[in-house]
Structures are given as structure tokens and as C-alpha cells.
Image (cartoon, rainbow, N blue to C red):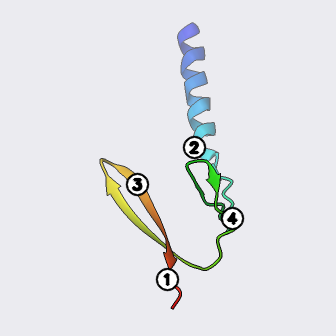
């Protein structure tokens, strides 16, 4: 009897886990607060170049973000 209940429980859990859709809550903001060594650089004015590079390493997705200040001529 216990074996039948256990099989039924596993069967029900399998069906319910397959029908659930997981939707991540992702929000992207363009506000950038740049700090270096704990000091806020909010007062720096100018043009900034922001580039990103995506790569896979050891089965992990890595995103490299570079922020460079564009020289004003």
C-alpha cells in the first residue's frame, strides 16, 4: 500500500512540475553609478563608451563590460 502511494505521489509531482512555467523577473535600467575604490564618480562629465562581450567558459556564460571615457578634442 505504501509503495502505491509513493508511486502515485511521484507521478503527481512529475506532472505538476512539467506544467509549471518559470518566468524570471528581469528589469534593465540604464542608470549607471560608477564607483572606484568606494568613491562615487557621479560628477564626471563627458562621453563614455560602454562595450560588452559575451563568452562561454567551462559551461558558464560570462559577460565582460568595459566602460571607457571618450577623449574630448
Task: Give the crowd class for mark 1: few <14, some 14-19, many >=20 residues within 10 Å.
Answer: few
Q: Nearer the viewer, residue 67 or 45?
A: 45
Residue sitting nearer the eye, 3 or 34? 34
Marks 2, 4: nearer the viewer: 4
Q: Which mark is residue 71?
A: 1
The residue labelled by disc 4 is: 42
**Label 2 sits on residue:** 18
| Marked residue nearer the N-terminal end (2 or 3) | 2
- Structural distance between the alpha carbons of marks 4 and 1: 18 Å
The Cα–Cα distance between marks 2 and 4, rounded to whole angstroms, is 47 Å
What crowding class fits label 2: few (fewer than 14 Cα within 10 Å), some (14-19), or many (20 or more)?
A: few
Q: Quadrant of residue 54?
A: bottom left
Residue under label 3: 61
| Distance (Cα) linking label 4 and label 3 | 30 Å
Nearer the observer: mark 2 or 1; the answer is: 1
Q: Residue at x 61, y 60 (%)?
A: 34
Amino acid at each position: 500500500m505504501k509503495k502505491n502511494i509513493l508511486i502515485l505521489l511521484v507521478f503527481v509531482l512529475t506532472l505538476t512540475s512539467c506544467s509549471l512555467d518559470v518566468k524570471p523577473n528581469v528589469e534593465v535600467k540604464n542608470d549607471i553609478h560608477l564607483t572606484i575604490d568606494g568613491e562615487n564618480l557621479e560628477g564626471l562629465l563627458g562621453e563614455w563608451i560602454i562595450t560588452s562581450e559575451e563568452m562561454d567558459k567551462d559551461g558558464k556564460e560570462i559577460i565582460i563590460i568595459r566602460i571607457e571615457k571618450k577623449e574630448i578634442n
